[in-house]
Amino acid sequence: MSKTYDALTDDLVAFIRAQKLFFVATAPLAHDGRVNLSPKGYDSLVIIDAKTLAWIDLGGSGVETIAHLRENKRITLMFCALEGSANIVRVYGEGDVLPMQTPEFEEMRAQHFPAFDRGRAVIRVRISSVSDSCGWGVPFYEFKGEREQLRRWVDARSLDEWAERRYETNGTSIDGLPALDRKA
């Protein structure tokens, strides 16, 4: 049976930290806008306290999460046990985008994500509720390692070249919402 919490408990924190993969869901306000669901890995998530978590957004071909959060802040994260006891944890809340050119991004990156020398944003989530459920329908999967393509692509470019490419390709979402902005 599912349980709901106002904040992360020690058991929920331990479960989240053990996962190698999580999913992020956001949606625009428009009824015909696309709901986005993105997988995340690279050990890019930190739990700041029982009501706050964050991850460094390393970039990608789309920028839906950033665009949706800029518009309405609604976000859900889901963690599934792919090994061990069956469990699913969903974190509901409001997300803030800390873009790469801001002092707050650099402060968060240095403090919480020192293994990453760049990212297009830090996404900080203020938790409104958390739920867990059985996860009996989730299959077992074996973690073999992170894919290295993203890091290779990033590392092959200077910081300026990489940042310029982010602004060129991640300025708007697929629905036309504003996302990355040099002035933000």
Image (cartoon, rainbow, N blue to C red):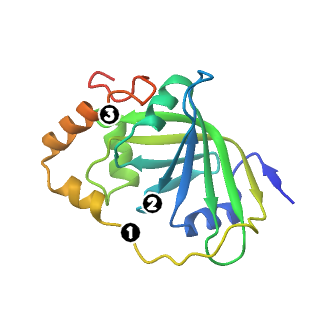
Residue 28, above or below 83? above
Kindly indicate the quadrant of the structure image that contains residue 51: top right
In the picture, the disc for residue 41 is: 2
How many numbered dots are placed on residues in this image? 3
- Check disc 1 and report the residue beneath it: 146
Residue at 26% from the left image edge and 25% from the top image edge: 182
- The alpha-carbon separation of the residues under discs 1 and 3 comes to 24 Å
Q: Which mark is in front, 2 or 3?
A: 3
- Check disc 3 and report the residue beneath it: 170
The mark that comes first in sequence, 1 or 3, is: 1
Q: Is residue 56 left or right of residue 130?
A: left
The mark that comes first in sequence, 2 or 3, is: 2
Whether tag 1 and tag 3 are in contact, CB under 8 A, the answer is no
Whether tag 2 and tag 1 are in contact, CB under 8 A, the answer is yes
Q: Secondary structure at mark 2?
A: loop
Residue at 35% from the left image edge and 67% from the top image edge: 147
Q: Secondary structure at mark 3?
A: loop
- The alpha-carbon separation of the residues under discs 2 and 3 comes to 20 Å
Q: Amino acid at mark 3?
A: Asn
Graded by Cα atoms within 10 Å as few (under 14), some (14 to 19) or many (20 or more), the crowding at tag 3 reads many
Foreground residue, 177 or 53? 177
Q: Position of residue 14 (x, y in %)?
A: 63, 67
The quarter of the image holding the C terminus is top left
The mark that comes first in sequence, 2 or 1, is: 2
Residue, far front: 32
The quarter of the image holding the N terminus is bottom right
Q: Amino acid at mark 1?
A: Glu
Residue at 25% from the left image edge and 53% from the top image edge: 117
Graded by Cα atoms within 10 Å as few (under 14), some (14 to 19) or many (20 or more), the crowding at tag 1 reads few
Q: Is residue 73 left or right of residue 175?
A: right
